[in-house]
Image (cartoon, rainbow, N blue to C red):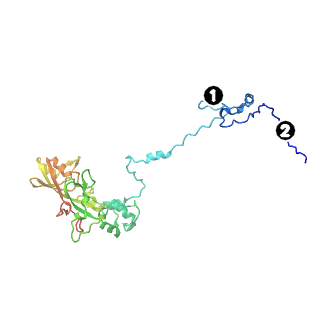
Amino acid sequence: MPESRRKTLGLPVRADGEQRPVNPRRKPVRGTGNTARRMPAEAEAAEPASTAKIDWRKKSPAKRGERPAGQPPARPKPPPAPKPRAAAKVADAPPGGRGESRPEPENHPAGVRVSKLMAERGLCSRREADEFIVRGWVYVDGERVAELGTRADPSAKISLDAQARAVQQRQMTILLHKPVGYVSGQPEPGCQPAVVLVRPESQQRSADTPLFHASHLKGLAPAGRLDVDSTGLLVLTQDGRVAKQLIGENSKVEKEYLVRVEGRLIDGGLALLNHGLALDGKPLRPARVEWLNDDQLRFILNEGRKRQIRRMCELVGLRVVGLKRVRIGAVRLGDLLLGQWRYLRENETF
């Protein structure tokens, strides 16, 4: 069989000792360091200027705003659009500053809020009124009202549904004989609130007395203060009507106190205690004050300023050493022992 001939590629034969030519376009091999092959000098010279690399360290930085020759200037940015809502917010801001309610628009329907009318008439508190309205338990001139914010004529007839009256009947009012050292409402350092004394074992009970339940403590709040150094009748209630009757701005319910004093009464001091004194720059309402014995006075007031009796006595040369409240309206402390409490009876009203 004849010998097959190999087909040659026609490449030139390299002689011994001849160096292999280097491709000028070949990139250096990574990781070879200084051993990487470099482009010969004649190849570098032959490289076009457009492909030559530029040393960034020798390039002078362009000034701000300069652009390369032949490039059109950039279009200026339009100014930011104004914010019309900012002025509206300032215009709509309440005149009295932060926290003050915004005035109602002039085109608001005429009339007074139904919840406000209910509170003014003593039907319930504002909070209770809103709850009854949402539940549909309020009628204005015979029509059911079920939307908050509804307004009505000030002379409109308002009535409550039977379910609302049943809820009010379940709201309890407690009479407590508060000892010295307990505060009426919020606790103070070293003192406890009087409500902690409302426990089953300290209840004064009778045959028709309701049984104590923990739900009777929910929302129980004092209707009128009694100083930590004073003792006597304190009213705690869940009923907003009772609270408004006793501590409302227009309340005129009488409160009777027995006050033990020491010191020397100034001339005309007793007349001033009855009428003519002022506290914090505001005149006091007329009161009834009389001597019971050499060191004890009876005060009957129809208002309740902070530490009012003690401050009144200081203005006429006396110092209070003991104070006890014995009556609020038609309800008396009676035989309720110190630290005891009882429910307000159905036949009792202030």
Name the N-terminal-most of marks 2 and 1. Answer: 2
Could you tell whether 127 is left or right of 257 in the image?
right
- Seen from the viewer's position, the closer of residues 131 and 288 is 131
CA distance for labels 2 and 1: 48 Å
Residue in the image at 63% along x and 28% along y? 58
Could you tell whether 341 is left or right of 85 in the image?
left
Question: Is residue 213 among what the camera can see?
Answer: yes
In this view, 230 is above or below 123: above
In this view, 59 is above or below 115: above
- Seen from the viewer's position, the closer of residues 206 and 134 is 206
Please say if the residues under marks 2 and 1 sit with CB atoms less than 8 Å apart: no
Task: Assign the C terminus to one quadrant of the image.
Answer: bottom left
In this view, 9 is above or below 211: above
Among all residues in the image, which is located at the extreme bottom? Answer: 207
Q: Check disc 1: other Cα within 10 Å, few if <14, some if 14-19, many if 20+.
A: few
User: Which residue carries the number 1 mark?
Assistant: 58
Question: Is residue 140 among what the camera can see?
Answer: no
The location of residue 130, given as percent across then percent down, is 37, 61
Q: Secondary structure at mark 2?
A: loop
The location of residue 242, given as percent across then percent down, is 27, 62
Give amino acid for label 1: Lys
Could you tell whether 147 is left or right of 232 in the image?
right
Give amino acid for label 2: Gly
The label on residue 10 is: 2
